[in-house]
Amino acid sequence: MIKKHFAILSITMASLFVNTTNSDACTNILVTKGASVDGSTFISYAADSHDFFGELYYWPGQEFPEGAMLDIREWDTGKHLGQIHQVSRTHTVIGNMNEHQLTIAETTFGGRPELRDTTGIMDYGSLIYVTLQRAKTAREAIHVMSQLVEDYGYYSSGESFSIADPNEVWIMEMIGKGPKNKGAVWVAIKVPDGYVSAHANQARITTFDLNDKENVLYSNDVISFARESGYFNGKNRDFSFADTYAPLDFGAVRFCEARVWSAFRLMNSDMNKYVSFIEGESTDRMPLFIKPEIKVSVRDVQNIMRDHFEGTPLSMTEDPGAGAYASPYRYRPLTWEVNGVQYFNERAISTQQTGFSFVAQMRNWLPNPIGGILWFGVDDANMTVYIPMYMGMNSIPENFAQGNGSMLEFSWNSAFWVFNWVANQAYNRYSYMIEDIRKVQTELEDKYELSTPAVDQAALALYQEDPKSAKAYITDYVHNQSRIAVSRWKKLGEFLMVKYLDGNLHEEENGVFLRNKYGNPKPAQFPGYSNNFYKRIADETGDKLKIKELPE
């Protein structure tokens, strides 16, 4: 159990992972059919990394000869880890969803560092994308993943996986058993229908029903290995996966569980009672899943992915780090030291270093090519546009395709770079520019929301006559919307550059800049800073900046 009144100096394991690992600072939200407004299942994911390029992956389904082998490279570094046997036929995968509407996402919790098996072959990323090419349902995915690590070893540190199909939503948590000890210990729990869950770089499965074979799956040695390793010596019914393999510390609560809390409180106001827990003042731990007060939509989940603790004691827009324009962003490192005392920045769901994020929507009443939509956006979730990527499309839109730009190669045709260009303007004038960004973001996402039923209906009518025609229609629709969105975002960036040039403000109405009666630009305005920021300057500078009377 965690101790009451955490010391700041106890920022250890969780903060290390958030600070130093490339792609483990992610957030997942999981929604079951009975908790969604239309009976869909949802999984959201943000791939948060300072060195991660946002693009949409694509593996077309293929057939392979007997004896074929598959090279496995570490997802984060590209390091070759080994080979595994290839299956005879693979499924098409677009991003983190496959042609059967199976979706898998993750967040890294790290856990006990001695349990990482550096001799294993399957790292967390390869485990996800290989499984998507082999499994059709969530339950089958859990079997495939556990079998892969048993056969080839698990290379990564502790991981939480979100696994969902159009009918079921599961959380699976896994950690290795140390060098040269092939396999992993793991547990998977089905989220009850009508409930939502979330995880964010901290193991969340505590105790579980060892006898509920329908809703709880686990490795045979998940408890016995803990006993042999000296991590646990209680009764089986008291065994907690999270407390055993990834004990909480201050960093785990404030940087990780706080994101879960913020997502939960946006779906159920009763979660505000856990403020003391995420502030490190209570041991009253949050549940693994909750029932939302009202049913949740795709747009709701998209907006939760944009959260910065607004309206809570953790709000990032009010302390000095927010600067003159109430920015909810903080540049790394996450922790720092002054006069021997350690301090930290909040870690919100939305962050500037996101490569891509998505809300996966799986719908069991439609054929798979139409039912599966990956609402996909690049860069910061707060300032992205979630574009519907249907699973039936035959190719990836050029603006999102792999190879169009990279982390070190700028491309005006790359969605990642265009959205980053806009966001990086806004970071320095946030309170002003976010209003302009929201207008265009809402304009585009409203259009997608309104168009989706008609697109579904048209695609379904075509599918019933000729599935290939339906897929061609879907492909054309997605490619067109992608081009329109990137073009519109580039126009937005140009507009922001003109409107806020050099710290000034050029007046406009409905996106058109105003001119005087002679046709020249109206004089620029000087909005300056907020009264609160001016007061802060006055308080900190004392008499230094006061206007004085000159001596006679």
Image (cartoon, rainbow, N blue to C red):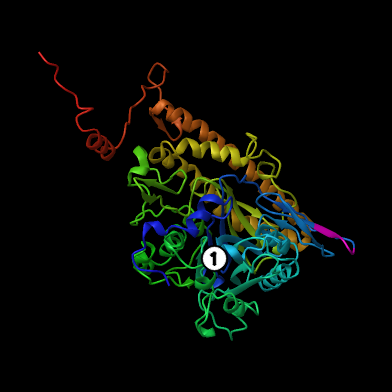
Residue span colored magenta: 66-70
Q: Is residue 445 something one can see in this rendering?
A: yes
Residue 526 position (above or below residue 41):
above
Q: Quadrant of the N terminus?
A: bottom left
Magenta portion: prevailing SS class: loop
Q: How many marks?
A: 1
437 lies left or right of 218 = left
**Badge 1: how crowded within 10 Å, few (<14), some, or many (20+)?**
many
190 lies left or right of 127 = left
In the orientation shown, which residue stands out farthest toward the left? 552
Observer-nearest of 5 and 319: 5
Q: Is residue 205 something one can see in this rendering?
A: no
Residue 235 position (above or below residue 76):
below
**Residue 60, quarter of picture:** bottom right
Q: Quadrant of the C terminus?
A: top left
Residue 284 position (above or below residue 540):
below
| Percent coordinates x, y for residue 477 in the rendering | 67, 49
| Percent coordinates x, y for residue 427 in the rendering | 45, 39
| Percent coordinates x, y for residue 379 in the rendering | 55, 45
The secondary structure type at the circle numbered 1 is: strand
Observer-nearest of 285 and 324: 285
- Residue picked out by circle 1: 30
| Percent coordinates x, y for residue 332 in the rendering | 47, 45
Observer-nearest of 210 and 291: 210
Instruction: Say which amino acid is labelled 1.
Output: Leu
At 53% across and 78% down in the image, what residue appears? 232
Decide whether residue 87 is among the magenta residues.
Answer: no
**Residue 339, quarter of picture:** top left
In the orientation shown, which residue stands out farthest toward the top? 552
